[in-house]
Image (tube, rainbow, N blue to C red):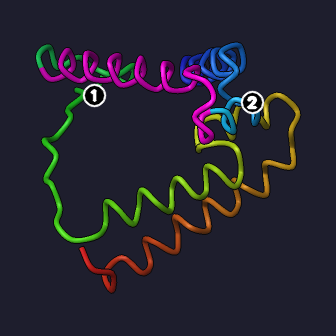
Amino acid sequence: MIAYLLAGTWFGIVLTKAEIISWYRIQEMFRFQSLHMYLIIGSAVVVAAVALRLVRRYAPTALSGERIEVPSKSWGRGVRYPVGGVLFGAGWALTGACPGPLYALVGSGVTVVLVVIFAALLGTWSYGHLRPRLPH
């Protein structure tokens, strides 16, 4: 548990130092005024792709000793990806942060973000409750 807390703290420091939690950087991105956020997102995609390939190839174990497995993605049909993407982007534009940086903002002392975290959890719970009735 301590290792995960330290990893999360380190991740929050990186997000803060890279200015990912800056509302102004988010606004620059949505207005296409700066490449800062696009370069960070692009580098995150590359790192994730390499990490996934390494995990699938070498099947490492977690700190708890469990084997880490990443199942293959089954692509869905319908409108769920476009609708989900629009809802995620709208929430990101309205709040100025996506889910990861929200916790870094709380750690930085911006406690008003707790309202956004509560709303995000409520939205996640609502989706889980309504999922069987939604088109997928």
Q: What is the magenta range?
A: 29-56
Q: Nearer the viewer, mark 2 or mark 1?
A: 2
In the rendered image, the quadrant that contains the C terminus is bottom left
Spot the residue most to the bottom: 133
Give the x, y percent position of residue 21.
70, 30
**Label 2 residue SS:** loop
In the rendered image, which residue does mark 1 sit on?
66
Q: Is residue 71 above or below residue 10?
A: below
| Main secondary structure of the magenta stretch | helix
Residue 62 inside the magenta-drawn segment = no
Residue count near mark 1 (Cα–Cα under 10 Å), binned few <14, some 14–19, many ≥20: few
In the rendered image, which residue does mark 2 sit on?
22
Give the x, y percent position of residue 42.
40, 22
- At x 61%, y 24%, the residue is 34
Residue 42 inside the magenta-drawn segment = yes
In the rendered image, the quadrant that contains the N terminus is top right
